[in-house]
Image (tube, helix red, strand yellow):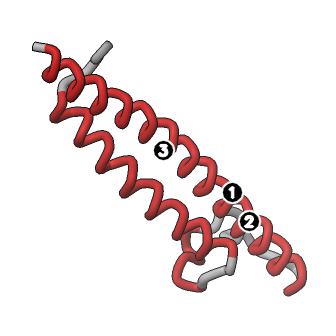
Amino acid sequence: MPVCGPKLSLCGLILSVWGIIQLTLMGVFYYIRAVALAEDVPGIEEEFHTLQDFYNAADAGYTQNAYNCWIAACIYVITLAISIHQFWANSRSTLNV
């Protein structure tokens, strides 16, 4: 049973694929501690007493951001599955008319 039209389901399909690719790559870059993403790491803005405290906070922030990106990519997989189903349901309903 189609809930949305063919254009919306195709748009959701394209955006889901794009989101999966982008968030997976961002998760990988956070996981390998890319310096370009350092300003988006939480918890490193405060002042630290030792260099090791800073490294620990940065590692924890990078890891947390990587996991957040991968969780969001998994949610995009769910929206991709829904969009594929809707696209299939719309193409199937036009064949029956």
Does the CB distance between marks 1 and 3 fall below 8 Å? no
Three-letter code, disc 3 = Tyr
Disc 1 element:
helix
Q: Which residue sits at x=45%, y=36%?
A: 81
Three-letter code, disc 1 = Tyr
From the viewer's perspective, is 90 left or right of 46?
Answer: left
Mark 1 against mark 3, which lies toward the viewer? 3
Mark with earlier residue (2, 3): 2
Mark with earlier residue (1, 3): 1
Q: Nearer the viewer, residue 47 or 36?
A: 36
Marks 1/3: CA–CA distance = 14 Å
Three-letter code, disc 2 = Thr
* Disc 3: which residue: 76
Disc 3 element:
helix
- Image coords of residue 65 (percent x, y): 65, 61
Q: Nearer the viewer, residue 93 or 75?
A: 93
* Disc 2: which residue: 63
